Image: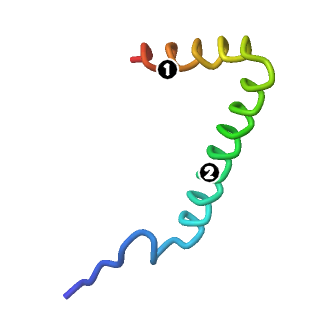
Amino acid sequence: MTTTTPAYVAHPKRKTRRRVAKALAWLSLALTAAMVLAEPWLLLPVLMLVIALSLWD
């Protein structure tokens, strides 16, 4: 009989990498929001990136 363990138990590094990635994503979002509040025209590159990602196949 073979038992399988969940990925988060078998690979603690993967869980750590996921937490770091999530923290970086939130930090970049907060920095972008701060820059847009300071200079509203900086929203244009963000919108172009979002549109490009939505059109990506």
What label sits on residue 37 in the rendered view? Answer: none
Write the residue at 24% across / 84% down: 2
Q: Is residue 36 above or below residue 16?
A: above
What is the count of numbered marks?
Answer: 2
Side of 21 relative to 27 (left or right) = left
Q: Is disc 1 in contact with disc 2, using a CB cutoff of under 8 Å?
A: no
Side of 6 relative to 41 (left or right) = left
What label sits on residue 53 in the rendered view? Answer: 1
- Classify mark 2: residues with Cα within 10 Å, few (<14), some (14-19) or many (20+): few
Write the residue at 71% across / 31% down: 32
Residue 37 location, x and y as percent?
74, 26
Write the residue at 39% across / 17% down: 57
N-terminal of the pair, mark 1 or mark 2, is: 2
Task: Tell me the amino acid under the disc marked 1.
Answer: Leu
Write the residue at 59% across / 52% down: 22
Which one is nearer the viewer's eye here, 3 or 41? Answer: 41
- Classify mark 1: residues with Cα within 10 Å, few (<14), some (14-19) or many (20+): few
SS class of the residue under badge 2? helix
Give the alpha-carbon distance from disc 1 to disc 2, as whole Å.
18 Å
Q: Is residue 39 above or below residue 1?
A: above
Side of 57 relative to 33 (left or right) = left
Q: Which residue is mark 2?
A: 21
Q: Is residue 31 above or below residue 12?
A: above
